[in-house]
Amino acid sequence: MEDTLLIHRLHFAFTVTFHYLFPQLTMGLAPLIVVMKTMALRTQNDIYNQASRFWAKIFGITFIMGVVTGIPMEFQFGTNWSQFARLTGGVIGQPLVMEGVFAFFLESAFLGLFLYGEKRLSPKGHWWAGFLVFAGSWLSGFFIIVTDAWMQHPVAFERLADGQFQVISFWGLLMNPWALLQYAHNMIGAVITGTFVMAAVGAYYILQGKFVEYGRVFLRVGVTGGVIACILAVFPTGDLHGKMLAKYQPVTTAAMEGLFKSETGAPIVILGQPDEEHEKIDNPLVVNKTLSFLIYGTTAAEVKGLNEFPKDQWPTNIPLLYYSYHIMAGLGSIFVAVMGISAFLLWRRKLYESRWILWIVMLCAPLPYVANTAGWMTAEIGRQPWLVYGLMRTSEGFSKYVHAGNGLFTLLGFMGLYTVLAILFLYLVHHEVEHGPEPGAEGVLRTNQPMWH
Amino acid sequence: MLFVWFWLVAIMIAGYVVLDGFDLGAGILHLVIAKTDQERRTVIRTVGPVWDGNEVWLLAGGGTLYFAFPLLYASAFSGFYLPLMIVLWLLILRGIGIELRMHLNSPVWRGLFDGCFAISSLLLTVFYGAALGNVVRGVPLQKDGYFFLPLWTNWNVGPQPGVLDWYTVIAGVVALVALTLHGAHYVAFKTSGELNTRARRVAGVLWPVLVLVTAASLVATLSIRPQLLANYRSYPVLYLVPAAVVAGLAAMFFYRRKGNDLGAFLSSCVYLVFMLVGAAAAVYPNLLVSTTDPALNITVENAHTGPYSLQVGLIFWGIGMAIAAGYFVFVYRMFRGKVGAASEGSGYL
């Protein structure tokens, strides 16, 4: 029983974590590509068109990875979490079907036109294709966040006698305040990934001394967008999210901050290892009274510690939750610094010559993935032990007839397949980056292919 | 209301089969009729801009089913756990095969991607057919509304069957033949020259096979579940559905003889749609029947979501699908015509 639950949890956790590595880049790149296409229309400078085409290729590879790893997500509600699907279908069925009919059709219809239809469309028409792919991918993200937000903070529902949840307000569900804030924070997180990746490729080109002109465009767009996104991630979205969490899931706040005992003027723990057994933080590095201030706006406020809550309501993996949150918040702070310095140097027209910061920007490329993943882990591990917060436990939701042996079989299958996908993805993106964005650099064989290029 | 949602789900499934069906068929034929890299690219180009949109019908259909009948979704998806997971893996390989092929210019890589595309397409059609066969045959539903089917047991149609038994294998073969033929008509319609000739030749060979397996599947179905005729007896007008299937088959034959590829393709759409309509009309109001006790059947009555959702859903679902239909018309118009005539360097358009 315990084993089966664990396997089903790992199954979803692994597949969704791997899946979200791709949409965060496509959702982050989409607005940047639209920006570059807008600049191309405005300035009539072909370098922006060429830059858009280059990123469209990366986008295309990433998008297909997101599509193929995304389909299993919709299936797994039923395959691995059938009791959850059955009881909550009356609520989350709505955003999930809306994602299909409003977002997926939009994305898929215009993706082909955007990736390969440039010659058939006018420049404006192609801009619209790009814009609609952007709109579709962001809309898709919204419906998924609505689904997750309802699990975090259930609203607009009634519970029937047999335990089923039933939605009672269409707009109430879509406009769940939790969803709006989580969506803002999440999409900004995706833009951070997009801007860091774009800036990092730019930095790489300049450091390599090839495709330098393009490197500058990528850096300019990436750093400008990046500094805005990094600040917005902390304030107001991250700040408001933290306050909302403290209000509705105070036990989660206590666990992720490592606050075992209630405290007036609670400190914030920057570093240290939570010791669950003795209920304390080892080797703590703290800033006094900051947590009270961040949550309540006054250093005198009391923050409730884990001791205020019954143990059966504690998140089930406190150290992992604590680390996830600290990694997200720590990296978020580092991003503000890196993008802030880069933006300052860009403004002073020194960025392209400051090789030290280019090195840092380039090496930072993987970190937004870590931060976004850690952020989602904070949200989902923090929600434990509940599937629907306060109402339905995780242990009540899985498919009880799919035993651990079957679950492990398919989990291993996904692990193997996704390892291959990851290698393939990295290889192909590397291939495109090395190939570069310049026209005519396509090579003899490539120009002989009239179809896909 | 429940009747309406039953048919909306059925429409989504039919839409998926007709649309993704032709690109699955093109995938199956990929290695058979396209020999050179140029020809293979042409085959992929016939489906390249549309396959992803077609596949969205599966997701949107699954979403619609979940939205309207959560119990069915929960029961069927966990009960068919293993075949669904295999379907997911095949969908992954297939998407990769189609979309990443052009990024690497190497015969070995391309051979690998072509193989992924073809083999996954073939296995998917068999699984889809078998899935439909399972729904028609029934599954060992328990009192709590759940079941779990192993991939196979003794290959017999009994109270404790597997996903695969002799009946569902027949259904799988029907789907394989029907969708391969569907794809052949589509490829013939979208290409010219040598590829067109080969696709037509394949269609010529497969047509009599399809007639044969369709008839066999009808006999097999009525032999394992004679009660499926009950709705037909109550509403004799339903006999028009199998008549439409026969008409679709006949029209396929005549249009192909006349060299009208579009006509043959549309006839194939008619055949597929009415095969599914016929099955849906036979099972209604059941969604999933129990092999052990008819009282345990999952029906539209006991599986549906709340009345408020169903009403609101009719509005937003209707709006969403109307817009989506607009995209489809637009995209198919953009990509109309034979693909072989594209000039150099024109993308895959």
Image: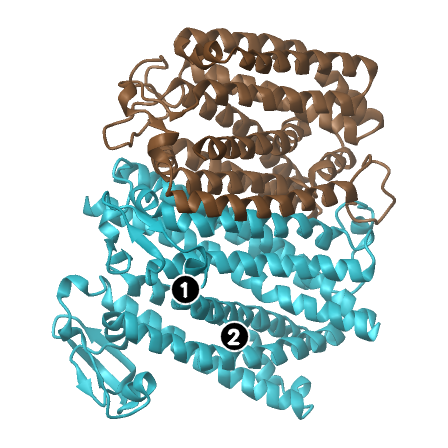
Q: Residues within 10 Å of mark 1 (few under 14, many from 20)?
A: some
Identify residue type, mark 1: Asn
Q: Quadrant of the N terminus of chain B?
A: top left
Identify residue type, mark 2: Cys
Residue at mark 2: A364
Q: Residue at x 71, y 54 (%)?
A: A115
Q: Residue at x 24, y 44 (%)?
A: A4
* Chain letter of disc 1 in the image: A
Q: Residue at x 26, y 35 (%)?
A: A401
Residue at mark 1: A176
* Chain letter of disc 2 in the image: A
Is B11 or B46 nearer to us in this picture?
Answer: B11
Label 1 SS: loop
Q: Is residue A207 visible?
A: no
**The hue in which chain A appears in the rendered picture of the protein:** cyan
Please determine whether, in this image, residue A123 is positioned above or below residue A410.
below
**The hue in which chain B appears in the rendered picture of the protein:** brown
